[in-house]
Amino acid sequence: MIEQQKIQKRRKKSSQISVLILASCSISRKKKASYKRQTH
């Protein structure tokens, strides 16, 4: 039981990290797009 709980916690952490990475990627893309608009 304890091992399963550890695995579940790890999975939650990894999923949270992947979500954060995806969010930061989308934000950076939006910033780049707005920056291009401003320069042109």
Image: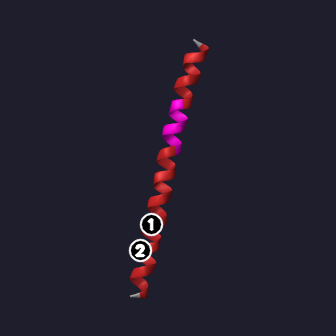
Q: Is residue 13 above or below residue 28?
A: below
Does the CB distance between marks 2 and 1 fall below 8 Å?
yes
* Magenta span: 24-30
Residue 31 has which mark? none
The kind of residue tagged 2 is Gln
The residue most toward the top is: 40
Q: Residue at x 47, y 46 (%)?
A: 22
Q: Residue at x 51, y 49 (%)?
A: 21
Residue 12 has which mark? 1
Q: Secondary structure at mark 1?
A: helix
Circle 2 residue: 8
Secondary structure mostly taken by the magenta-highlighted segment of the chain: helix
For the N terminus, the image quarter is bottom left
Q: Is residue 18 above or below residue 34?
A: below
Picture coordinates of residue 4, whole percent (x, y)? 39, 81
The kind of residue tagged 1 is Lys
Picture coordinates of residue 11, whole percent (x, y)? 43, 68
The residue most toward the bottom is: 1
Q: Is residue 21 above or below residue 8?
A: above
Label 1, residues with CA under 10 Å away: few <14, some 14-19, many ≥20: few
Q: Residue at x 42, y 80 (%)?
A: 5
Label 2, residues with CA under 10 Å away: few <14, some 14-19, many ≥20: few
Picture coordinates of residue 8, whole percent (x, y)? 41, 74
Does the magenta portion include 4? no
Q: Is residue 1 above or below residue 24?
A: below
User: What separation in Å lies between label 2 and label 1 (alpha carbons)?
Assistant: 6 Å
Q: Residue at x 49, y 45 (%)?
A: 23
For the C terminus, the image quarter is top right
Q: Secondary structure at mark 2?
A: helix
Q: How many marks?
A: 2
Left/right of residue 6 with respect to residue 36 in the rendered view: left
